[in-house]
Image (cartoon, helix red, strand yellow):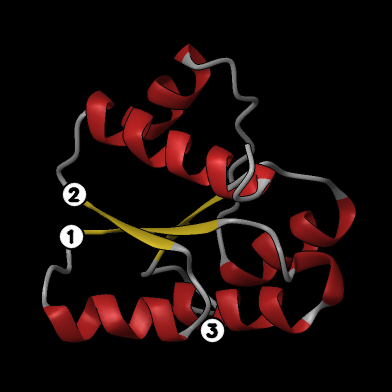
Amino acid sequence: MVVRVLMERRNYRVVEAASGPEALDLVKDEAFDVVLMDLSMPGMDGLETTRHIRSDAAGSQLPVVALTAHTSHKEQQMCLEAGMNAVLRKPFDSEQVDRLLGLLDHSAKGPDA
């Protein structure tokens, strides 16, 4: 709920998936600016879901960010190795979300932006 409010305040349209397979279907059917991925989802966890997104050409450039309470270096590394662009650790605040979205927007525009 907190993530929804933070994103909607920034004029993002928020679409939620209840499971990994549902997230994959949504990514295949719609264009998204960013995916905020929960690591613990039914049916397929966030790591596996991200790997599937990355295996499809359409999802190869889509920014995927882990939302997690897992804070160990090993868990963060697993997220990055699965193809996620960043890890946002819970609890987080609106300033962290703004910084992350700014970084993702800048990297999407390329180094000359």
Q: Residue 26: percent from the left, percent from the top? A: 76, 54
Name the residue located 39 percent from the left edge and 61 percent from the top edge.
86
Name the residue located 19 percent from the left edge and 39 percent from the top edge.
92
Alpha carbons under labels 1 and 3: distance apart: 18 Å
- Give amino acid for label 1: Ala
- 25 vs 68, left or right, is right
- Give amino acid for label 3: Glu
Identify the mark at residue 52; answer none if there is no mark: none
Identify the mark at residue 69; answer none if there is no mark: 1
Q: Earlier in the sequence, mark 1 or mark 3?
A: 3
Q: Earlier in the sequence, mark 2 or mark 3?
A: 3
Residue 48 image-quadrant placement: bottom right
- Give amino acid for label 2: Lys
Residue assigned mark 2: 90
Q: Residue 32: percent from the left, percent from the top? A: 72, 44
Residue assigned mark 3: 48
**Do the CB atoms of the residues marked 1 and 2 lie less than 8 Å apart?**
yes
Residue 60 or 66: which is nearer the viewer? 60
Residue 68 image-quadrant placement: bottom left
Alpha carbons under labels 1 and 2: distance apart: 5 Å
